[in-house]
Amino acid sequence: DSGVTQTPKHLITATGQRVTLRCSPRSGDLSVYWYQQSLDQGLQFLIQYYNGEERAKGNILERFSAQQFPDLHSELNLSSLELGDSALYFCASSVVAGGLETQYFGPGTRLLVL
Amino acid sequence: TQLLEQSPQFLSIQEGENLTVYCNSSSVFSSLQWYRQEPGEGPVLLVTVVTGGEVKKLKRLTFQFGDARKDSSLHITAAQPGDTGLYLCAGSDSWGKLQFGAGTQVVVTP
C-alpha cells in the first residue's frame, strides 16, 4: 500500500460523457502527478500540481483538466469522452529526500469508454 | 514520442534463469528510476540511480547506469515467479518530471 488512494477503481461510461477521477496523496506530500497508461502509449505524464498550483504539464488534452484542492487532494476531469480515452489513470504523490524525488503511485482508476 | 526505449518488450523465462532488461535514451537525465508494476496496481519504485557508471544491487536485482547517463540496465539473477511484472524505466528532468519507457513485461514460470 503506497498510501495514495484513488477513486473510483473502475469506471464505465459512454462517449461524449464527462467523468471525475479523485486522488488523495500520501499524508504530507504536496505534489500530485496524473498519468495515463494505455496499451499502445505506455505511461504518459499528464499534469503535476504542487500545493494547489499547476507545476508542469505533459501530454494532457484540452478536454482534460485537473485541480488540487486546499486539503491537497486532486481531481482529474475528463470531458467529451472518446473511445481512445479508455485507459488506466494513475495519480502519484512525491517526496524529495537527499535531492532525489520519489513518486508513490496509487492503484489507478480503470476507465472504459463504450 | 518515447524518449526512453526499453528492450525487449516481452521476456518469458523459467524460474532460476537470469535476465537483463535494457533502457536506452538519446537524452541525458538527472536521474533514472526503475519501477515494477503488477497487474491491477500502480508502479512501485525499485531503485534510483544518479551517477554515471553507478551500480546498485537490491537482493537478486542489479541496476547499472551508463557512464553518459543515457542508458541503464536491470539484471535479475536466478529469477523467481515473484519477479513477474512490468518493469518500467523512467528518466527524471530537473523538475522531477518523469519520462517513462514503454516497459518490459517479464514472465517467470515455475
Image (cartoon, rainbow, N blue to C red):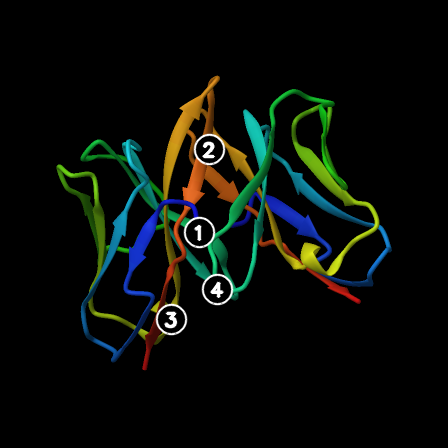
- The answer to whether A23 appears left or right of B77 in the picture is left
Instruction: Report which quarter residue A87 is drawn in.
Output: bottom left
The residue depicted at 50 percent of the width and 32 percent of the height is B92
- The answer to whether B27 appears left or right of A49 in the picture is right
- The answer to whether B7 appears left or right of A50 in the picture is right
Q: CA distance from mark 1 to mark 2?
A: 17 Å
**Amino acid beneath label 1:** Gln
**Helix or strand or loop: what does disc 4 sit on?**
loop
Q: How far from the left and from the top, in percent, is residue A26?
A: 32, 39
Task: Name the residue at the left extreme.
Answer: A70
Q: How far from the left and from the top, in percent, is residue A51?
A: 21, 31
Q: Which of the chains bears the disc numbered 4? A: B
Q: How far from the left and from the top, in percent, is residue A79?
A: 20, 65
Both labels 1 and 2 in a single chain: yes
User: Label 3, on which residue?
Assistant: A84
User: Label 2, on which residue?
Assistant: A102
Q: Which of the chains bears the disc numbered 3? A: A
Q: Which of the chains bears the disc numbered 1? A: A
In this view, A53 is above or below A7: above
